[in-house]
Amino acid sequence: MNRIFTGGTILTMADDKQVEAVYVEDNIIKAKGSLEDCKKVARWYEIVDLKGKCMTPGFVDTHTHPMMIGMCRIWADLDFPKVACIDDLVRVLKEHAETIPEEESICGYGFDQRMFKEKVHPTAKDLDRVSTDRFVQIMHASGHCNVVNTKLLRAIGVQDDTPDPPGGAFGRDHDGKPNGQLFDSANDLLSGIHGVRPQNHGPNIHMPGTEENLMKRFEVGQEFFVRAGITTVNEVQLTKQELNTYLRARDQGKLRMRMEMSFLSNYLDEVIDLGFNSDFGDNWLSIGSIKFYSDASLLSGTANVSTGYLDSERNKGYNYHEPEEMIEILVKAHKNRLHTLTHACGDGAVDPIIDAIEKAQAEDPWPEAIHRVEHAGLVTEEQAIRMGKVGMIPSTQPEFLYLYGDGVVNGVGSEKGEEFMPMARFKKYCPYFTLSSDAPVTTPNPMESISTAVSRKTNLGTVMCPEQAITVEDGLKGYTIYGARALRRDHICGSIEVGKLADFAVLSESPLDIPIEEIEKMREITVDETWLDGEKIYERK
């Protein structure tokens, strides 16, 4: 179908910034500029009237967990303020239990201990109040911690004398006995004998399920991106479970977004042996990158923060790998022409990553390499300068600041916490940066993310270090063209340019029209349509 889009604001995210019309032939952008320019190129066409709305390139989310958001939205919703204390938690889980078959486990997602009245993680004793004869499991908002009831704790083999695993830990009571809290690699115990076990390569967010259940998770999760105008995503923790599901979705015609898939680093040797590299795949599914973990979660209090924590009995975080091993595996990936993305929430986890990329580029220069730092929440100015010199890209989630900023300040102190998500620092020193959701840690919504990056205001009304704000245009680029570059897809998406694929989001109004003093109104902008490959795949009712 040949179409000319016109009648509204069209933001291209290219040098021309804004045009009157765009001509699409089948699924390719063939012309842009004035309406008359487009009509001259088109042989025949229909007019798509934007009715005064704003069209942008389809958004590019560089850090997502599509199946995880589907899984978590099937579970009980434990978000704040719905759940603001332990009693709320127990009540919501009991209510959820009444809606599912009795043989199913009672599961919930999204609790944040820093927002609880008690300011502590729940324990097995708390979940025993929900049920003692059914399994109960809840996942922290970060995905880095689960809490289980006593029945499930014993079923997975945890006894009073079970030691902490490498890359993880058990929460413990005052006598040192496991209390139901499973941090990071300890969650491998929940995946069963045949499930995914990342060990010290990352948190286990890959709860087992049947093929039918796994596909349902994907379909539920995918809809969040489609409704948000996001047409390209990076699945940043690919295991056999996700890969098999995405391949089935493609073959069954269920894939409604483009995906860069990043294998988890426990597969590094296998990926190298199989010959995957930076050019494997097509416009729908591609593989060419490896996801590493340097530390754990700032939100659950396990990230490596150099100054420690102020709000927890566990005042130190940890790294998944010793610095020497972190450097070794990152250099290995680079030398085998695999792009990398490495999770680092605390400042204490960043230096080994930079050391590795400096070493890799010195020993085996690869100018085209994309080496990213994921989250980069507490990156210092010195670290940002070093990142920029070696061409590293921060992949950020400003909405973390909105949802969790006050808790971060309480956890690590105001001096460090106020600079959480230092976007202006990245703009100054790094080649570019990306904005993303880390769904399900936040719900995919580019307008909310950009608004927070500009306002630096939390959901409790705190404005944190306004000197670290960026502009609306910066934010839009971070969620479009910069994201496409980070995924090596800027030749097909991320901007409205001739030759690129016809992936668009249509917004209720232009973000650039919001006065800076009213920037929070950007959170009210809606995605009214999503277009993929030249076809409308979503329309807001």
Image (cartoon, rainbow, N blue to C red):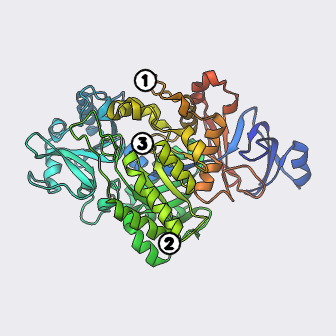
**Mark 1 nearby-residue class (10 Å; few <14, some 14–19, many ≥20):** few
* Residue with the mark numbered 2: 335
Task: Give the SS element for disc 3.
Answer: loop
Amino acid type shown at disc 2: Lys
Real-space CA distance between mark 1 and mark 2, rounded to the nearest whole angstrom: 46 Å
Amino acid type shown at disc 3: Val
State left or right for residue 248 relative to residue 165: right
Q: Nearer the viewer, residue 440 or 333?
A: 333
Real-space CA distance between mark 1 and mark 3, rounded to the nearest whole angstrom: 18 Å
Task: Give the SS element for disc 2.
Answer: helix
Upstream in sequence: badge 3 or badge 2: 2
Q: Looking at the rendering, which quadrant does residue 201 occupy? A: bottom left
State left or right for residue 184 relative to residue 488: left
Q: Looking at the rendering, which quadrant does residue 86 occupy? A: top left
Label placed on residue 460: 1
Amino acid type shown at disc 1: Leu
Identify the residue at horizontal 49%, vertical 25% (top origin). 463
Expressed as whole percent of the image width and height from the top left, the position of residue 282 reads: 61, 66
Upstream in sequence: badge 1 or badge 3: 3
Rendered-image quadrant of the N terminus: bottom right
Q: Is residue 11 above or below residue 268?
A: above
Task: Give the SS element for disc 1.
Answer: loop
